[in-house]
Amino acid sequence: MIVDIPEDKDPIAYVWGEMVPGIGPAAAGFSLAVYAHTTLGLREFEAARLRIAQLNGCAFCLDWRTERDGEKVEDGFLDALAEWRTTDAFDERTRLAAEYAERYALDHHGLDEEFWARMTTRYSQAEIVELSMCIGSWWAFGRLNRVLGLDTACVLPGAGRSPAGERRREK
């Protein structure tokens, strides 16, 4: 971690709350809102979230899976995501979510009419806005946590410590 964290403080709560009390809690609220209020299907949600995690290199986000009503994406989903262009494990909405996440992060100027034509045949305008906000949250806050070295200390409510973080701390 590049930020000095007092021994008695949780790194995430300290950085996101105490260090920047005018910004951090609002950012945390937005970050949590994308999980609490999404209307997107679990597979497209996770395809976009995990593709951003791959691009950010966020240890926690790569290890953690969103759970809804006791359901998570299948084992092997992350491996299939590495091959999102060619895998037969994804339907078109899931593949488009992965593509959009990647292009949003790496080539937002290249989002052309051809892409939007494909996207608007599978997603409503409201879903596109929602997915854009989710991706923006993951890109910004996952990148922030990775850059500051907080990604191994990250905890989402009810999720417990990151397995990657525990492995890194054991070394």
Image (cartoon, rainbow, N blue to C red):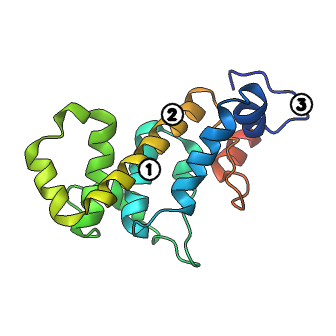
Give the residue at mark 1. Answer: 134
The first of marks 3 and 1 along the sequence is 3
**Along the line of sight, the residue nearer the viewer: 41 or 150:** 41
Q: Position of residue 131 (x, y in %)?
A: 37, 54
**Residue labelled with disc 2:** 143
- Percent position (x, y) of residue 67? 56, 69
Q: In which image quadrant can residue 14 be found?
A: top right
**128 sits to left or right of 135:** left
Q: Residue furthest left?
A: 114
- Residue depicted at x 47% and y 69%: 75
> In x, y percent, where is residue 34?
51, 55
Other-residue count near label 2 (Cα within 10 Å), few / some / many at <14 / 14–19 / ≥20:
many
In the rendered view, tell whether residue 75 sits above or below residue 60: below
Tell me where residue 122 sits by quadrant: bottom left
Q: Residues within 10 Å of mark 1 (few under 14, many from 20)?
A: many
- x, y percentage for residue 127? 33, 60
What is the CA distance from the residue labelled 3 to the residue labelled 1? 32 Å
- Residue under pointer 3: 7
Q: Secondary structure at mark 3?
A: loop
**Residue occupying image coordinates x 67% and y 51%:** 162
Amino acid carrying mark 3 in the image: Glu
* Residue under the point 57% across and 57% down: 64
